[in-house]
Amino acid sequence: MKKPVALLLASLMVASLAACGTNTVSESTTSAAVSTSTQTSAQTGAEAKGPVTIKYPTYRVGTHYSAAFEKEQIAKFNEKFGNEVKVQVEEIPSDTAYNDKMKILAASGDLPDVVMGKNGINEILIKGNLATPFNEYLDKDSEWKADIGDEAIAANTRDGKVWSISDQKQVIGYFYNKEMFEKAGIKPAETWDEFLANCDKLKSAGFTPLALMTGENAWTTNLMLSSIVGTSGEAGNKFMNTLHPASFETPEMIEGLKKIQIMLKKYTTKDAIGAVYANAANNFEQGKAAIIANGPWMIGDFSDKSKSPEGFDKKVGVAAYPGSGAFLSYEVGYMIGSDAQDKKDAAAKFIKYKTSAEGQSIALELGNVLPVSDKVQPSEEFKQKYPVFVETIDVGNSAKVKYQYFDTIVFPNVTDTWKNLYPELAFDKLTAEQFAKKLTEVAAKNK
């Protein structure tokens, strides 16, 4: 042990003498060394930490109308913020599969970081205290808040808390085959009695009038029902603009269900009972039905040769519903399902980009999605390519009666009920009155 100790003492003496002769240089050198060491340590720590990973399941994949803009938005986000946030995308093949999975994950308390609140998922997350409000994020970013707009923010606010951020405005009329209308000698109806008369004339001319569906959330069928109720007068319009109606046993609902019963029995395709959205869309795009109730996101399909015959887009017109009605609402959009604060912040950053003016512009140009911000306008090239989109905006602006659709106003369990009741209505196993009563009973389970 003596030799090492002697060497150590000698070393310390030399160091002490050197320090006395060159104090300034030593301090500078030491300071630089410490600074370099600290910087290296910080860099190593940052590299070790890396970007925050967030989970983002999406049904906007494959042939879904939103797949193109979804892919582009994620790519652009990665270019700008990939060093801060890593988006772990899980592709889910359909809207229904997505809804089912989110409900299961909500029940187990194992939600992904970013959730789309459609079809009642927002209600489940809010009720279960499983989501994080956006108020603080919006208050810190006035530009983003302006991109969303007061109306869209208000649409997703409950008790002062902004639970989700809308990524699109819904202006929905119905599309019709102009060629079939011309051959049947009809024009878009101004009343619902005229609408049913038009269906008779289309049928007499050899065409199936309506592309309806009762599977999933009965989307195209419920757009028709919503419009019948929403244009039926003051009481019906109020009903279609009321969140969580307690009773469906109203004259307007019963009359609407009676008309839908006629449509399902006489005027739609053979596969409508149990059909999903893809079936209804295909029936219209392949010329198997003359009318489909749907939104502007479908417009790109009309010129897509993998979905529609060449030149089909030239045959499509858009109209307001009888009674000068149109849907005007905001999509529920994105919610934060994270637990940890760093993941909440990362999820908010991702949602902010997707719903920013740039994100909205991508959705507009690649997905025919109507932006929530008036600042985001279609390019001239887009207008030339999709004139029906411009017509849809005109229909929405000129419609005298505005209302929401059922998915945005009813409880989630009511949304799940349509697919079970519509077949019974179509096969006369339920009357319109019994149908309405069952909806009321289902809604009452939320008390």
Image (tube, rainbow, N blue to C red):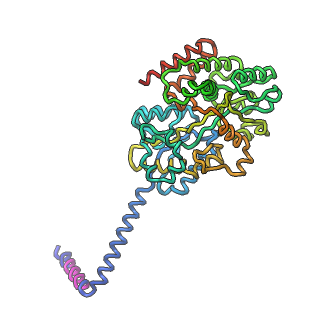
101, above or below 151, in the image: above
In the image, is residue 222 above or below residue 109?
Answer: above
**Towards the viewer: 196 or 402:** 402
- Residue 17 within the magenta-colored segment of the rendering: yes
Q: Is residue 427 a member of the stretch shown in magenta? A: no
Q: Look at the image and give the residue range highlighted in magenta.
A: 7-18
The answer to which quarter of the image holds residue 386 is: top right
Question: For residue 174, which quarter of the picture?
Answer: top right
Residue 73 vs 207, above or below: the answer is below
Residue 220 sits above or below residue 305 on the image: above
Total marks shown come to 0
Which residue is at 82% across, 26% downward? Answer: 185
Q: Is residue 215 visible?
A: no
State whether the magenta stretch is mostly helix, strand or loop: helix
- Image quarter in which the C terminus is found: top left
Q: Position of residue 408 (x, y in %)?
A: 53, 32
Image x and y of residue 296, in percent: 66, 39
